[in-house]
Image (tube, rainbow, N blue to C red):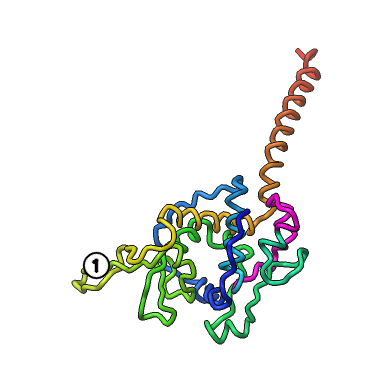
Amino acid sequence: MKRIAPRSTLTAVLLLISGTALAAGAKVPLDQAQTDLGNMASIQRGAALYVNYCQGCHSAEYMLYSRLAEDLELTEEQVERNLILTGAKIGEPMVSTMDPADATVWFGAPAPDLSVIARSRGVDWLYTYLRSFYVDPNRPIGWNNTVLANASMPHVLWQLQGIQEPVFETQTDETGVSKEVLVDLKLATPGAQTEAEYDRTIRDLVTYLEYQSEPAKLKRESMGVWVLLYLALFTFLAYLLKLEFWRDVH
């Protein structure tokens, strides 16, 4: 698995979604994430993205590093070398290095735990959100988001995606009042990745977050096939038994 070089402490600090920001947000059309938990390479890439871009601020206290080795077809040595950037031990949870008190001072609230964010928000919401940042000089952090307006999280992945600018349109409501409405985003400054490459990057990250939200899902779904086959066989045997019991009944 290719390792992504760790970002600076400052960059890690910037990846923050405040608890109050997560609690609100307007309804917007969501793009389909099309995640695939059967794609182990995607989950591995997403795990590398997560520890490099997310874990500096966000903890995943219900996820153990050792579980990554168990589920993601990695050795403990690979996990320690590529996915543990905080000095933690292999059997410890994935805790952020950010002090909650510092987060409160800098952003107004501690960064929320992301253990089950994919189950809470949904993969389509996360996929759309992480691709919908735009520059906003009116915001203290300099960024805004069409999915979650006025969020406290800057666009930490801007070097990959590039810089998007908002496209406004004057619209008049039924009362005759005109106002500027954000209708689209345009890429003003290209990033290190093309649009397709960045979409895949976010899909990998969201796929990992989906896995992290329910690690047992991988095994549960694989076991489910065998359970259904067992039930089908049991049903067939029960049917044959019924025929045998009722054979002499007229």
Residue 59, image quadrant:
bottom right
Residue 185 in sight: no
**Residue 73 magenta-highlighted:** yes
Q: Position of residue 16 (x, y in %)?
A: 54, 74
Give the residue at the far left of this rendering: 176
Dot 1 falls on a residue whose secondary structure is strand
State whether residue 42 is above or below residue 19: above
Q: Which residues are magenta?
A: 57-78
Q: Position of residue 113 (x, y in %)?
A: 62, 70
The three-letter amino acid code for the residue at tag 1 is: Glu
**Residue 135 magenta-highlighted:** no
State whether residue 215 is above or below residue 152: above
> Residue beneath label 1, please?
169
State whether residue 109 is above or below residue 170: below
Residue at 70% across, 32% down: 229
Residue 250 in sight: yes
Query: For the residue carrying disc 1, how many other residues have a C-alpha within 10 Å: few (<14), some (14-19), or many (20+)?
Result: few
Residue 46, image quadrant:
bottom right
Residue 186, image quadrant:
bottom left
> Where does the C terminus fall, quadrant-wise?
top right
State whether residue 108 is above or below residue 84: below
Residue at 61% across, 69% down: 55
